[in-house]
Image (tube, rainbow, N blue to C red):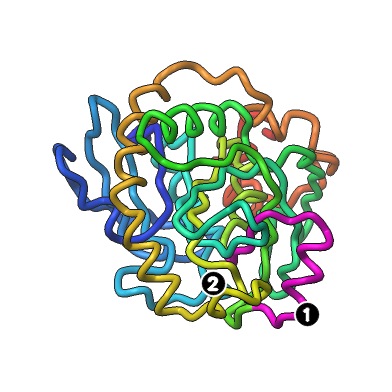
């Protein structure tokens, strides 16, 4: 099914975009349950885009409870090849100010309670993840953000924490000592699952606060984070509109063949039920 080539995972305000044409809602079924919510598909500048609210409408799903496997699988089933993640993050660097945008190129995984792979249970795959965000998509987003007038930082390390609590001051300073640029709760396992699904994935990380390390600034609160994220919705919409028009070309990055040499299990040893459930992902490699 080729309903949309571009997927956007983010807040519910993003799919209420001016000029979004031929809108419809779909609720794909997946072997991993239901996605976070209905997926809104619409035409944006001649390109079909699928919008998925990560936390569900009304922000009712906590970061740890997000059905990430169902979300990524559902987007894959719609024909999505590019996923743009829009998320709120805390800044861990003095020069990344609240309301700045970061397009990270690296990630540190500090999650601990999330399933982060489609595989297991009789099928082993080891997927390369040295560059966790698609460099081609990240470059397109950087150019679009620059044109949209955002104060954007290209590159940086995203520290993915478990949540739902924010960091302690000691943790925040530890992550700063590691060289992390921003901290958030949602880039993983999305980025890992997108890579297994051979979908290009990149993040528009909007800084909403200085986490809690900055002694001269107020410690982060959810009210502060949501208020600043709301201020960036307009910027995110401008970036998406510019970027979507440039994502019609064929992909040349390695994301599109991430599973090619990653599946280790002998085909005859893979359970038939798993072959059926994961045909969308592994069908071109495992018969």
Which residue is pictured at 70% across the width and 33% down the height? 258
In which quarter of the view is residue 134 placed?
top right
Looking at the picture, how far across and down is residue 172, in whole percent? 72, 72
Q: Nearer the viewer, mark 2 or mark 1?
A: 1
Looking at the image, residue 172 sits to the left or right of residue 71; the answer is right
- Around disc 2, counting alpha carbons within 10 Å, would you say few (fewer than 14), some (14 to 19), or many (20 or more)? many
Disc 2, disc 1: CB below 8 Å?
no
Which residue is pictured at 74% across the width and 56% down the height? 180
Looking at the image, residue 117 sits to the left or right of residue 56; the answer is right
Which residue is pictured at 63% across the width and 44% down the height? 104
- Figure quadrant of the C terminus: top right
- Around disc 1, counting alpha carbons within 10 Å, would you say few (fewer than 14), some (14 to 19), or many (20 or more)? few
Looking at the image, residue 19 sits to the left or right of residue 157; the answer is left
Looking at the picture, how far across and down is residue 230, in whole percent? 33, 62
Which stretch did the figure color magenta?
167-185
Looking at the picture, how far across and down is residue 240, in whole percent? 35, 38
Q: Which mark is residue 63?
A: 2
**Magenta highlight on residue 151:** no
Residue that mark 1 sits on: 170
Q: Which mark is residue 146?
A: none
In which quarter of the view is residue 46 placed?
top left
Callout 1: SS: helix
């Amino acid at each position: 099914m080729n309903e949309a080539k571009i997927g956007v995972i983010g807040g519910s305000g993003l799919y209420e975009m001016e000029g979004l044409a031929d809108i419809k809602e779909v609720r794909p079924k997946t072997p991993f349950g239901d996605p976070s919510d209905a997926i809104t598909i619409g035409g944006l500048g001649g390109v079909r885009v699928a919008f998925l609210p990560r936390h569900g409408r009304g922000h009712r799903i906590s970061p740890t409870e997000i059905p990430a496997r169902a979300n990524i699988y559902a987007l894959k089933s719609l024909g999505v090849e590019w996923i743009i993640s829009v998320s709120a993050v805390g800044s861990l660097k003095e020069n990344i100010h609240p309301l700045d945008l970061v397009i990270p190129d690296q990630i540190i995984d500090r999650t601990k309670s999330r399933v982060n792979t489609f595989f297991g249970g009789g099928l082993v795959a080891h997927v390369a993840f040295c560059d966790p965000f698609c460099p081609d998509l990240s470059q397109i987003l950087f150019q679009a953000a620059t044109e949209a007038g955002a104060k954007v930082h290209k590159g940086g390390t995203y520290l993915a924490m478990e949540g739902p609590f924010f960091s302690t001051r000691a943790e925040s300073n530890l992550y700063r000592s590691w060289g992390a640029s921003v901290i958030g709760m949602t880039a993983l396992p999305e980025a890992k699952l997108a890579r297994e699904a051979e979908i290009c994935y990149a993040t528009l990380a909007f800084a909403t606060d200085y986490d809690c390390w900055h002694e001269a600034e107020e410690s982060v609160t959810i009210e502060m984070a949501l208020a600043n994220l709301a201020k960036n919705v307009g910027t995110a919409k401008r970036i998406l509109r510019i970027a979507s028009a440039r994502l019609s070309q064929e992909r040349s990055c390695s994301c599109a063949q991430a599973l090619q040499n990653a599946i280790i299990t002998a085909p005859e040893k893979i359970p038939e039920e798993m072959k059926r459930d994961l045909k969308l992902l592994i069908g071109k490699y495992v018969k």
